[in-house]
Amino acid sequence: MVPHLITALTGPINELEQRVLDTMPAIERWFRLEWMEHTPPFYTAVDVRNAGFKLAPVDTNFFPAGWNNLTPQMLPLAVQAAQAAIEKTCPEARNLLIVPENNSRGTYYLMNLAQLRSIFNMAGLNVRIGSISPDIKKSTTIELPDGESITLEPVVRTRGRIGVKDFDPCTILLNNDLRNGVPGILEDLHEQYLLPPLHASWTTRRKSMHFQCYEEVAKRFGKLIGVDHWLITPMFEKYGVADLQTPEGLAALAARIDGMLTKVKKKYKEYGIKERPFLVIKADNRTSGNTILTVRDTKDLETKLRTLGAGADSTFAPLELILQEGVLTNERVNDAVAEPVVYLMDRYVVGGFYRMHAERGVDENLSAPGSSYVPLAFAEGTQLPQPGVRPGASAPNRFYMYGVIGRLAMLAASYELEATDPEAERYD
């Protein structure tokens, strides 16, 4: 299914598409050289927004669920990428343990685990699913709607290694972002590979660090292909801990918002964009969802901010904030607002889907209750772009471009993990 872009397919995005196609050999060589110097995250999902005048990532997930949204046509790509990733990490690997989210009883999430299990089975590994949730005290099998079943087993730790009963893995795949902190059972493992590493979790991660790394990558990429990196980059500012309980704190936040909106308006004017710019305010140190607030001006800021963590007593918990330029999505699937999500494993684009939400607007977060998903085989687009086709007329070319943006975000993620690695040697 190909989305309907309500913006006329002209202007900066088409120019960007043309530049990407014209410089494809240089782009692929550039990525190849980057991956000789940097290690990609084990797996990644990147939310991309296409405004018609701008194409940019707005979120990068190091512990992606939703693998059940990949179509059967995508699976060979995922299996090949899984083999490459495992060979790089632990070539002699025989056993893989998947550690899921603690609240992992939802059918949709369990189907995601079943798909991951299938991918790594086909990559040549014995796979079990070991939960660190205190609620899982014994082996629990759950039937899934498609006829498959999933068995959750309690993780046990023995002599500095973790596994499940009668199963000692060499590799542990985290599908748990550890947003509530790193449990001791996962620390100081002996001769086991933990992927992604613990410092990829929200205990350590900051979105501002990721977008700082992405901006660096995008500037170099823009120079490579001869385009303004703003066309593929959301502006952002790290705000720090916000004082949302005093007039002075709210005034300081409003001043920063006004300052950043002015910068965005300047770029809109430069490109003749008639849309009204907006910002999103996000918690810097947690996943997205209901921690996102859309702001077009600073009127009624205090009232709006109550969605960002106010309790019943109308007081605000301290929050680390990031201000990010909002990127419209002008894509539609079945008349619902949609955005592409690109899935990557090792350094390869393996597929993706459209996240859509019938009740959300073009400037709102779509990763929210009520969203649905349309699988989309990116395979043809990411592997076989069609040079010579008029920009905007070829779905594979548009999908190839999504894959390029996804890989830029994944490269930024590798920079981020290197910068935050507690065991890395520093030469300051």
Image (cartoon, rainbow, N blue to C red):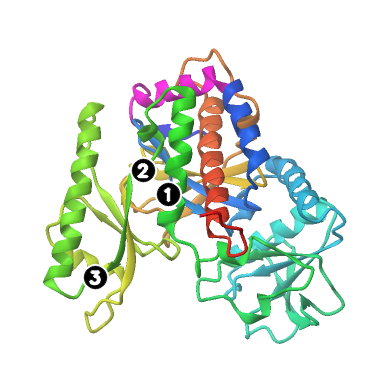
> In the image, is residue 7 part of the stretch drawn in magenta?
yes
Would residue 17 appear left or right of 280 to someone viewing this image?
Answer: right
Q: Is residue 48 visible?
A: no
Q: Residue 320 — which label? A: none
Judged from this view, the residue extending furthest toward the top is: 388
Q: Is residue 424 visible?
A: yes
Of the numbered discs 1 and 2, the one sitting upstream in the chain is 1
Q: Position of residue 227 (x, y in %)?
A: 40, 25
Distance of label 1 from label 3 (alpha carbons): 25 Å
Distance of label 3 from label 2 (alpha carbons): 25 Å
Residue at image position (40%, 21%) is 15
Of the numbered discs 1 and 3, the one sitting upstream in the chain is 1
**Mark 3 residue type:** Arg
**In front of the other: label 1 or label 3?**
1
Q: Disc 3 designates what residue?
A: 306
Q: Secondary structure at mark 3?
A: helix
Vertical order, 48 against 180 (above or below): above
Q: Residue 234 — which label? A: 2
Q: Position of residue 222 (x, y in %)?
A: 44, 29
> In the image, is residue 216 part of the stretch drawn in magenta?
no
Would residue 145 appear left or right of 220 to someone viewing this image?
Answer: right
Q: Position of residue 402 (x, y in %)?
A: 51, 35
**Mark 1 residue type:** Phe
Q: Position of residue 381 (x, y in %)?
A: 59, 30
Q: Which residues are magenta?
A: 6-24
**In front of the other: label 1 or label 2?**
1
Front position in the image: 75 or 30: 30
Q: Disc 1 designates what residue?
A: 211
